[in-house]
Image: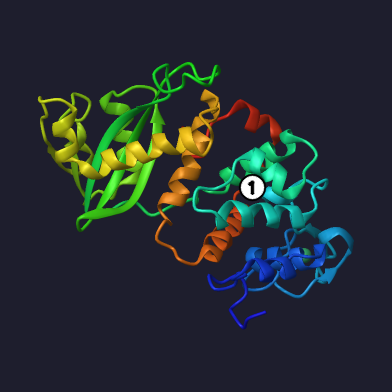
Amino acid sequence: MENAKPGAATDYPRTFEEMDAWFRTEAGCRDYIRRLRWPDGFVCGCCGVIGEPWVMARGVFRCKACHGNTSLTAGTVFQDPRTPLRMWFLAMWFTTSQKNGVSALGLQRVLGVGRYKTAWTWMHKLRRAMVRPGRDRLTGEIEVDETYVGGPEEGTRGREIEKQSIVVVAAEKNGRGIGRIRRRRVKDVTAESLRDFIRETVDPGATIHTDGWNGYPGLPAAGDKHRGTVISDGDEHAHEVMPRVHHVASLLKRWLLGTLQGGVQQQHRGSYLDEFTFRFNRRRSNARGLLFHRLAQQAVAVGPVPYGSIVRGGSVQGA
Ligand SMILES: [Zn+2]
């Protein structure tokens, strides 16, 4: 193991072999979760005292000050006692080490999981961890536009794809390229829906480019510098005026159709789009282990994900 600060951004396995060695035992997995959860030393969940605890069985720590017990995984994605921690780490590795991710079926095969539903549930729990709480807002010049996802013309193979979703995408300008993105599914394209999205994802000082659609004129009220570009010549023109956001929209649709074989139920679309956003915003990261680290870190921070809430669908980004 390296001399990296515990839980720091450099504290991750570099290769499959390293990962395999770090997380071969439950104790090894617990060690890593502990470093992520308490990088500055164990904090008692009962009394808040910082100090070396007694290590009990099954990942329970007992505070030497108040004798209260704190579970290592309680309140994290890894809470489920039936799943060996090693399986979580393998799943996180496979999902972050491949450029386009892995489907539940792919994960089931590579991990030798008995039931498809198990792998499916794991993937959904990990997707919840792909959205970082309190993320920074986009800055500089931002292109914002809505796109329609799903629906009959795209989902001809998936019986369960019925309704279209409206997804608003914000893409940061980075020279001639694209910086970070944010997206959200909205119920409608009213000024209110769009303003809420922009307020939460875009810095007030940013300049926003839109296609001048009716829903956007209320934007300056939110404190943004807003440049509506009225487009009347159809889509061709829109691509030229806002190439970034349109590129993102097409990648996003391809992601839903390709990686996931188009079989995305409408209520889960938002959660798949969370994964798309997670990957897109880290697409230039050469160190795949860094993605693994980020995912593990957020899985510790995000809280447990009850199965019922997965079945109902939805995403952290309110999509
Ligand atoms: Zn205590």
Q: Position of residue 2 (x, y in %)?
A: 63, 81
Check the image and report above or below for 309 versus 22: above
Q: Nearer the viewer, residue 61 or 259?
A: 259
Tag 1: amino acid: Gly
Q: Residues within 10 Å of mark 1 (few under 14, many from 20)?
A: some
Disc 1 marks which residue? Answer: 303
Question: Which of 143/152 is in front?
Answer: 152
Q: Is residue 236 left or right of residue 165?
A: left
Q: Is residue 298 visible?
A: yes
Q: Residue at x 30, y 24 (%)?
A: 189
Viewer can see residue 211: no
Tell me residue 267's x, y (percent): 54, 25
Please tell me which residue is depicted at 59% across the width and 78% down the height of the picture: 5
Vertically, is 20 above or below 153? Answer: below
Q: Residue at x 47, y 32 (%)?
A: 257
Quarter location, residue 3: bottom right
Q: Is residue 200 left or right of residue 133?
A: left
**Which quadrant would residue 37 be assigned to in this image?**
bottom right
Q: Position of residue 271 (x, y in %)?
A: 52, 36
Identify the secondary structure beneath mark 1: loop
Tell me which residue sits at (74%, 63%) in the image.
29
Classify mark 1 as within 8 Å of ligand 1 or not, answering yes or no: no
Where is ligand 1, by quadrant? Answer: bottom right
Q: Is residue 231 left or right of residue 108?
A: left
Against 9, is 252 above or below?
above
Is 30 left or right of 94, judged from the image as shown? right
Image quarter in which the N terminus is found: bottom right
The image quarter containing residue 296 is bottom right
